[in-house]
Image: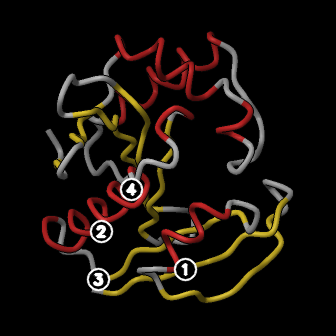
Amino acid sequence: MIFTTQRLSVRKLEKNDLDLFHKLQSDHHIMRYVGGKTFSLEENRKDLDKIVKFYSKPSNNFWVWAITLKENNLLIGTCVLIKNDKGENEIGYRLLKEYWGKGIGKEITNGLIKYSFEVLRLKEIIAYVDKKNAASIKIIDATFRFIKEFYNDEDNCIDRYYKLSN
């Protein structure tokens, strides 16, 4: 277990999470704000294998974890804490559609913040949010400091860039 919140547990992904991981990564509605590309079962199998291998890598700074409901251990999404290519500690999450609008995005964001600052003792975390992702912007605006908007060539969107210091 990495950390828990009131309703959620965060743990390492496992190879037997493939079905729900694939459901998450192959849904256009979920992926539209993270580049828009969906992935095949085989691509998701390879991605999940790669993520699981990262866990045992010394000095790993690419953490992708499973978000599960405490009540039944059902995987409902993923969250990340990664050191991006700019050397920043970036957080993010994806949830299955049936869990949208239930306060889970806010709950997992607050859990990631607490874990980053209280357990890992990070000085700063950042988040990038597609300008069209109104639900995530509302969550991040409530806690993080907005820095700027910019065009993201890789994802072909306008991103909002946020920072939060401990």
Q: Badge 3, how many Cα within 10 Å: few under 14, some, many 20+?
A: few
Q: Element at badge 3?
A: loop
Total numbered circles: 4
Depth check, mark 4 against mark 1: the one in front is 1
Residue 48 in percent (x, y) is at 46, 23
**Label 4 to label 1, Cα distance in Å?**
15 Å
Q: Mark 1 points at which residue?
A: 162
Q: Which of 30 and 85 is in front in this view?
A: 30
- Amino acid of disc 4: Leu
**Label 3 to label 4, Cα distance in Å?**
14 Å
Depth check, mark 3 against mark 1: the one in front is 1
- Amino acid of disc 2: Ile
Q: Badge 4, how many Cα within 10 Å: few under 14, some, many 20+?
A: many
Residue 40 in percent (x, y) is at 69, 15
Give the mark nearer the N terminus: 3 vs 4: 4
Q: In this view, does 133 lie to the left or right of 79?
A: right
Q: Badge 1, how many Cα within 10 Å: few under 14, some, many 20+?
A: many
**Label 3 to label 2, Cα distance in Å?**
11 Å
Q: Which mark is residue 123?
A: 3
- Amino acid of disc 3: Lys
Q: Element at badge 1?
A: strand
Q: Name the residue under label 4.
A: 81
Residue 65 in percent (x, y) is at 34, 39
